Image (cartoon, grey):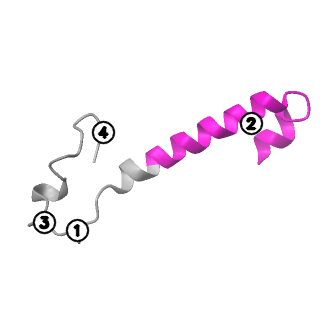
């Protein structure tokens, strides 16, 4: 990764931390952007959101 090759030479821990934060953010972004597939069975989950799904996590 570009960050590791530029920052990792002197500050390895900072580069790894930044890479981890970016990876977690990018994963969260993709999951929330893609959302639930429309083919999910609606009779089991009205609105394609399970009843047990916490309201503070976007679906």
Nearer to us in this view, 25 or 44: 44
Q: State left or right for residue 30 relative to residue 46.
A: right
Q: Report the predominant secondary structure element of the magenta stretch.
A: helix
- Residue 26's mark? none
Whether residue 24 is in magenta: the answer is yes
35 shown above or below 15 = below
- How far apart are the two marked residues, 2 and 4, measured between alpha carbons? 27 Å
Are the residues tagged 1 and 3 within 8 Å (C-beta)? Answer: yes
Rendered location of residue 25, percent (x, y): 52, 40
Q: Report if the CB atoms under discs 1 and 4 are less than 8 Å apart.
A: no
- Rate crowding at label 1 as few (under 14), some (14 to 19) or many (20 or more) other CA atoms within 10 Å: few
Callout 1 touching callout 2 (CB < 8 Å): no
Label 3 and label 2: CA atoms lie apart by 41 Å
Could you tell which of marks 2 and 4 lies nearer the N-terminus? 2
| SS for dot 3 | loop
- The residue drawn where x is 55% and y is 42% is 24
How crowded is the residue under tag 4: few (<14 C-alpha within 10 Å), some, or many (20+)? few
Q: CA distance from mark 1 to mark 3?
A: 6 Å
Identify the mark nearer the N-term, 4 or 3: 3
Name the disc covering residue 57, or none: 4
Q: Residue at x 19, y 46 (%)?
A: 52
Alpha carbon of mark 1 to alpha carbon of mark 4: how far? Answer: 18 Å
Of the two numbered discs 1 and 4 on the same chain, state the one appearing first in sequence: 1
| Range shown magenta | 1-29
Q: Is residue 31 above or below residue 18?
A: below
Image point (69%, 32%), residue name: 17
- Whichever of labels 1 and 2 marks the residue nearer the N terminus, that label is 2
Of pointers 3 and 2, the one earlier in the residue sequence: 2
Q: Name the residue tied to disc 2.
A: 16
Task: Tell me the number on the disc at residue 42.
Answer: 3
Numbered tag placed on residue 40 in the rendering: 1
């Amino acid at each position: 990764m570009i960050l590791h090759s530029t920052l990792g030479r002197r500050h390895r821990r900072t580069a790894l931390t930044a890479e981890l934060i970016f990876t977690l953010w990018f994963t969260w972004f993709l999951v929330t952007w893609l959302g639930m597939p429309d083919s999910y069975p609606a009779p089991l989950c009205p609105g394609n959101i399970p009843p047990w799904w916490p309201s503070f996590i976007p679906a």
